[in-house]
Image (cartoon, helix red, strand yellow):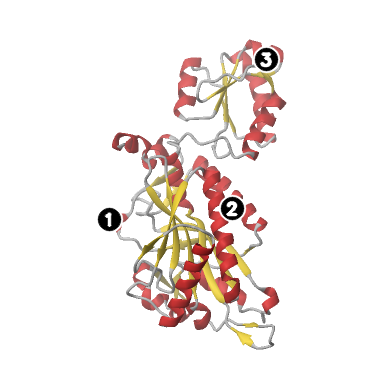
């Protein structure tokens, strides 16, 4: 197991597959994505956007820095300051956001809201900065700047149950797509927290009820909630059965209070909405780290930064290989071409080391027949195919998330 974990270490694979770097020259805990790592990230983010739009979320985006007074109002300055960075602009102090909640509340507050508008679901691939201690930083898993697939749902208390159920379904769907099992935990009030006992009780019960109503089994994690509310944590299990924090749902009665959020109810009176903070995959950086280790760098076709590679036997096949390459790129197939005059055996080893799903050797036969002969990473040969048929095949795998 230890041996296997070492082989799958995402820092080692990140280097070998040329996905990213983290180094002291740029700063500890700061990730630089290389082209292939960025492509992987782009694929995940595109999937996120599509899935959120399908589920009735609105995409929004807030600034990286907000005035310190807002962080005082939210309680972050009192309870989360040690994890935050601050900067001065025109003699004013600004906090660099460690969470995305504040802008989302300002969007809610920009209009008078009616009960008919609710729930409102604001989604942001929000980049945040948190000051983690140098000692805990680890590759992509613990970093100081990361992007969350964050959303804030503002709803009436009676809508909580259905919203939590919908999020749990979303998490279940996502875990299935990426091939993970998971466990659920309920984390309760921590020592340092804001809000009244009754609000904490309400919020904790809302989460508990939603879990029980939906027959989701869970364990209780005493005192591990966020400072503003209790949460449901989803811990995914990777191929080596290691557990990683991914999705969370936090129930919050306090921030809507502090920001004086309201809606006009059916009774014509003003009421306070409840806010759910939630992420599905969590920090994209960490999720990528987990994915790299889970798949040992051999990503399924739909996620692979390079889906296929063209290998020429001699220079004679270069013109045909170029035509195929251009057709693939035009068709949205993520392709590379090894056209230099290295020996074929060397090129094959390169493609294997890069863990590319399909290797397409272009010899005289392929040129004459205007075909490709794909060979899968596991050694299986697909036989000679017209180029368009291979494109359709790759598209179908992406469609099916294989
Ligand atoms: Zn939040």
Disc 2/disc 3 C-alpha distance (Å): 40 Å
Q: Which residue is mark 1?
A: 135
User: Can residue 201 be seen at all in this image of the molecule?
Assistant: yes
Sequence order check, earlier mark of 2 and 3: 2
In the picture, residue 327 is in which quadrant? top right
Picture residue at 68% right of the left edge, 20% below the top: 385
Q: What crowding class fits label 2: few (fewer than 14 Cα within 10 Å), some (14-19), or many (20 or more)? A: some
- The answer to whether the residues at label 2 and label 3 have Cβ atoms under 8 Å apart is no
Picture residue at 42% right of the left edge, 44% below the top: 238
- Residue 48, numbered label: 2
145 relative to 16, above or below: below
Foreground mark, 1 or 3?
1
SS assignment at label 2: helix
Give coordinates of residue 177: x percent, y percent.
Answer: 56, 44
- The answer to whether the residues at label 1 and label 2 have Cβ atoms under 8 Å apart is no
Picture residue at 66% right of the left edge, 62% below the top: 56
Foreground mark, 1 or 2?
2
Quadrant in the picture for the C terminus: top right
Disc 1/disc 2 C-alpha distance (Å): 31 Å
* Residue farthest bottom in this picture: 269
Q: Is residue 37 left or right of residue 398?
A: left
In the picture, residue 29 is in which quadrant? bottom left
Foreground mark, 2 or 3?
2
Give coordinates of residue 305: x percent, y percent.
Answer: 54, 38
SS assignment at label 1: helix
Q: Is mark 2 within 8 Å of ligand 1?
A: no
Q: Which residue is mark 3?
A: 367
Quadrant in the picture for the N terminus: top left
Sequence order check, earlier mark of 1 and 2: 2
281 relative to 108, above or below: above
183 relative to 165, above or below: above
């Amino acid at each position: 197991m230890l041996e296997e974990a070492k082989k799958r270490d995402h820092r080692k694979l990140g280097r070998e597959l040329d996905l990213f770097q983290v180094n002291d020259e740029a700063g500890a805990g700061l990730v630089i994505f290389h082209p292939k790592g960025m492509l992987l990230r782009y694929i995940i983010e595109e999937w996120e956007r599509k899935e959120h739009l399908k589920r009735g979320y609105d995409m929004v985006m807030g600034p990286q820095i907000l005035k310190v007074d807002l962080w005082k109002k939210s309680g972050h300055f009192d309870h989360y300051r040690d994890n935050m960075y601050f900067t001065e602009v025109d003699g004013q102090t600004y906090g660099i956001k460690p969470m995305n909640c504040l802008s989302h509340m300002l969007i809610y507050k920009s209009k008078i809201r009616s009960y008919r508008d609710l729930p409102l679901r604001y989604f942001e691939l929000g980049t945040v900065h948190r000051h983690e201690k140098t000692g805990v930083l680890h590759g992509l898993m613990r970093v100081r700047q990361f992007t969350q697939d964050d959303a804030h749902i503002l709803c009436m208390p009676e809508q909580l149950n259905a919203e939590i159920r919908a999020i749990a379904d979303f998490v279940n769907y996502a875990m299935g797509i990426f091939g993970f099992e998971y466990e659920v935990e309920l984390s309760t009030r921590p020592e340092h927290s804001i809000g009244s006992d009754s609000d904490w009780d309400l919020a904790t019960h809302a989460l508990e009820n939603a879990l029980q109503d939906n027959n989701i089994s869970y364990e209780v994690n005493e005192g591990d909630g966020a400072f503003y509310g209790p949460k449901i944590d989803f811990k995914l299990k990777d191929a080596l059965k290691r557990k990683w924090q991914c999705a969370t749902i936090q129930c919050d009665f306090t921030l809507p209070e502090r920001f004086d959020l309201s809606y006009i109810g059916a009774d014509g009176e003003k009421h306070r909405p409840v806010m759910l903070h939630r992420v599905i995959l969590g920090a994209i950086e960490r999720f990528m780290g987990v994915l790299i280790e889970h798949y040992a760098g051999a990503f399924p076709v739909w996620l692979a930064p390079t889906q296929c590679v063209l290998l020429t036997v001699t220079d004679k096949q270069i013109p045909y290989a170029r035509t195929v390459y251009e057709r693939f790129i035009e068709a949205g197939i993520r392709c590379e071409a090894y056209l230099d005059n290295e020996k074929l055996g060397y090129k094959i080893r390169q493609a294997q080391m890069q863990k590319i799903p399909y290797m397409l050797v272009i010899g005289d036969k392929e040129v004459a027949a205007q075909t490709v002969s794909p060979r899968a990473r596991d050694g299986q040969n697909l036989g000679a195919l017209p180029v368009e048929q291979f494109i359709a095949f790759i598209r179908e795998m992406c469609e099916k998330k294989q």
